[in-house]
Amino acid sequence: MSAVLELKNLGYTYGKGTPFEKRAVDGVSLSINKGELVGIIGHTGSGKSTLVQMLNGLIRPTDGQVLLEGTDIWEKPKEIRKIRFRVGMVFQYPEYQLFEETVYKDIAFGPTNMGKTGDELDFAVRSAASFTGLKPELLDKSPFDLSGGEKRRAAIAGVIAMDPDVLVLDEPTAGLDPMGRELLLSQIIQYHKQRKNTVLLVSHSMEDIARVADRIMVMSRSRLVMFEETKEVFSHGAELEQIGLRVPEITKIMQELKNRGFDIPDGILTVDEAFAVLSRLLKKEGKIW
Amino acid sequence: MVRDVAFGQYFPAKSLIHRLDPRAKLVMFTAYIVIIFCTFNFASLAVTTAFTVLFVALSGVPFKFYFKSLKVIILIVLITSLLNLFYGSGEPIWQWWIFRITQNGINRAIFVTLRIVCLILASSCLTFTTSPTEMTDAIERLMKPLKILHFPVHEIAMMMSLALRFVPTLLEETDKIMQAQKARGSDFESGGITKRVRALTPILVPLFVSAFRRAYEIATAMECRCYNGGDGRTRMKSIHLSARDCISFAVLGLVITGVILCNIFLEPAI
């Protein structure tokens, strides 16, 4: 597997040289493989947002490097826009960035900036809309007439339409109702499976992250404290709690059962897994058939 | 970037100037601005400059911040003082082609520079040491007499404080929207003027939408708390004139008298 993104000793300081100087990201080094789905978790203010904004050159690191497929993204500062098409970034509450007259035009904004026209553009827009589950008849409506969840989908489609190699999503499910959350999350997984590109997902919901991520980056106080496989990360419950995070509820329950002497394996992350394990256990004890 | 502008920002501290009654500050500021432009000889100029130095030092705001707001107007100062330098009357002391410098021109340049610098320092001092709420409070109280003429004093003050409260919010919002559109390949830095203006649409439309949304939200929030205008409202922090306000009035009075006396008894320099 080859690395698509590599961070070398990456750091960022806000307001350098002023009394308000603040180190937001400090000495982060890691590499992310092609086709991975990486979760990023961390307490509010731990530097996640600053970190992801450096990945596509929205802010320039004060030290260290970001390598996209082996080349420094700031090698040619004039061509930083090209990097932004390759590393797509969906911000928190992206629906507030909608501005065009129709949903179609808004989704087309990114690909048009890339220089796409005609059939190619049309294909990009329509496939992005279907990836995010946006009904085709909504495309001709004004984005301001959509519901909250639909707006969110439209905004995410606007980034997916650029067909980036790496897609970064900052809290994509924040503020959605449980059904909307579930649906959006499964669409992200679907998208990831079909396009086989790299996805980075920032989230406060450990349940969401546990469900989708292959590996997890844990940020705390501007530093990267863990970057491991999902099961591995969530087996460090005590450490996570120390930095203000937690493990998914279900993992905690299963861990507690294990501590009480039940025969339960480590690292259970979803309700489905727990259900399978528990029903096997109950069958063995003859409680259910 | 947009947030780096120092001019007009409140700097929280507990200095003497901070604790002055905002109404007194506003009145004194207005009087002082008038007097700055009534200095016609070096003695009176020295008095106002010294007074400026005094309250800047007393304000407890690091000089760096004053310097930042001076930086914004440095070009204006340079241009006006250069113009004044070459447009003086009287005997030239240096001449080349159409440019001639006279003693009067030099004096004018010095006066205009110092006056503008004092003006900026004074207004920065006012905004650094007075929070926006104090400021609107003061304006409301000072304009109260206009109520007899059915002038909506309270409404205007409320509008002002709401507007001021949303300045940082909207700046932050602009920043966010800009980042988001940049991530979709918006290009604000290159191209001709028409292209650049057009590139602003993706920022302005969402910004207006969110400004309206916030306006509705705040209106609802105010109505939920039974806001119904200014009649009979009392304040959480009522403002009172105190001894230190009287002393500062006295000091300013001395400065004004000084300037007037200098103007009467000394020859004007410009």
Image (tube, helix red, strand yellow):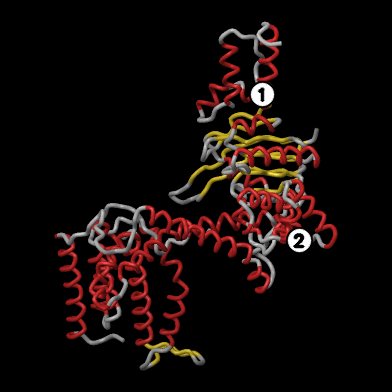
Label disc, if present, on residue A89 of the rendered structure: none
The Cα–Cα distance between marks 1 and 2, rounded to whole angstroms, is 41 Å
The amino acid on which the numbered mark 1 sits, given as a three-letter code, is Lys
Q: In the current view of this chain or complex, which residue is farthest to the front?
A: A289
Q: Position of residue A53 (x, y in %)?
A: 62, 47
In this view, the residue in front, B231 or B165, is B231
Residue at 56% in and 15% down:
A256
The answer to whether one can see residue B62 in this image is yes
Assess whether mark 2 and mark 1 are in contact (beta carbons under 8 angstroms): no
Upstream in sequence: badge 1 or badge 2: 2
Q: Are marks 1 and 2 on the same chain?
A: yes
Rendered position, B70 above or below B99? above
Q: In the current view of this chain or complex, which residue is farthest to the top?
A: A285
Dot 2, crowdedness within 10 Å: few (<14), some or many (≥20)? some
Numbered disc 1: secondary structure: helix
Q: Which residue is mark 2?
A: A112
Numbered disc 2: secondary structure: helix
Label disc, if present, on residue A231 of the rendered structure: 1
Left/right of residue B88 with respect to residue A115 in the rendered view: left
Tell me which corner region of the image, top left, top right, bottom left or bottom right, holds residue B259: bottom left
Rendered position, A3 above or below A160? above
Residue at 24% in and 66% down:
B23
Q: Position of residue B125 (x, y in %)?
A: 32, 63
Residue at 69% in and 32% down:
A213
The amino acid on which the numbered mark 2 sits, given as a three-letter code, is Thr
Q: Quadrant of the C terminus of chain B?
A: bottom left
Left/right of residue B101 with respect to residue B44 in the rendered view: right
Dot 1, crowdedness within 10 Å: few (<14), some or many (≥20)? some
The answer to whether one can see residue A59 in this image is no
In this view, the residue in front, A140 or A36, is A140
Q: Count up the numbered dots.
A: 2
Q: Position of residue A184 (x, y in %)?
A: 68, 41
